[in-house]
Image (cartoon, helix red, strand yellow):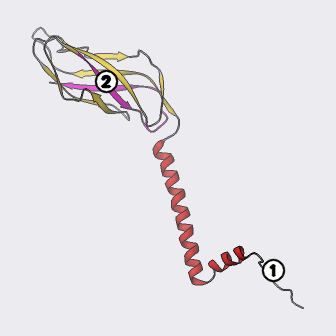
Amino acid sequence: MTEDPPTIRSPILRNRSLFFRGRQGRVRLAAISGVVALVALAAFALAVTVGSGSVVVRGVQFQLIEGTTTQGFPWIYPSLTNDTTGFPISVPSGHTFTVTLLVINDDNVNHTLVSAEAAGSFAVTGVDPNLPIGVEGHDDGTLFFTIQVPNANLGSTMAFVTLMIE
């Protein structure tokens, strides 16, 4: 005597098993598997893009690329400075922080602050007021830099920003 195969009594489970039978069922199963794989891949890509951990920023070094006055002094003071006031700070990977720089035009003619660029995997995402901006002779002004940290855990590091002046 042969034994009857087990039967599925629940109408929900019985309908689900019919859903995957035959050629159309295999196509449905492949489509569902593909969607699940795409969702898993997207979640992995998002985790890699956002990064994990944080970056400890010990300070920001500003270097001004500029000419000199007739007396041989740089146009804008300071031409090289390390800002460590309020540092170190811990910034989540991929996020931004803001730092200020006071610039003083020691020349008797106007000069233009043209652009700002961060070195390495840091990025200057904004400067307030927007560049380019003029600084009158023997005048000063404060710039606010928004700097994005990398999407990687670099541990403890300095950010380096170069400011071009004409």
* Quarter containing the N terminus: bottom right
- Which residue is pictured at 72% across the width and 77% down the height? 11
Residue extending farthest to the front is: 11
| Marks 1 & 2, CB-CB < 8 Å contact | no
- Residue to which mark 2 is pinned: 144
**Vertical placement of residue 64 versus 49, above or below:** above
Inspect the magenta stretch and tell me whether residue 161 lies in it.
yes
* Quarter containing the C terminus: top left
Which one is in front, 44 or 12? 12
Residue 42 x, y percent position in the rendering = 49, 55
Residue 123 x, y percent position in the rendering = 34, 34
- Which residue is pictured at 56% across the width and 63% down the height? 36
Marks counted in the figure total 2
Boundaries of the magenta span: 141-166
> 10 Å neighbourhood of mark 1: few (<14), some, or many (≥20)?
few
> 10 Å neighbourhood of mark 2: few (<14), some, or many (≥20)?
some
**Vertical placement of residue 94 versus 110, above or below:** below
Task: Please indicate whether residue 79 sits to the left or right of residue 9 in the image.
Answer: left
- Residue to which mark 1 is pinned: 6
What mark, if any, has residue 59 been given in the picture? none
Q: Main secondary structure of the magenta part?
A: strand
**Vertical placement of residue 62 versus 106, above or below:** below
Q: Give the spatial CA distance, label 1 vs label 2.
A: 73 Å
User: Which amino acid does the dot numbered 1 rest on?
Assistant: Pro
User: Which amino acid does the dot numbered 2 rest on?
Assistant: Phe
Classify residue 129 by image quadrant.
top left
Which one is in front, 32 or 76? 32
Q: Secondary structure at mark 2?
A: strand
Inspect the magenta stretch and tell me whether residue 101 lies in it.
no
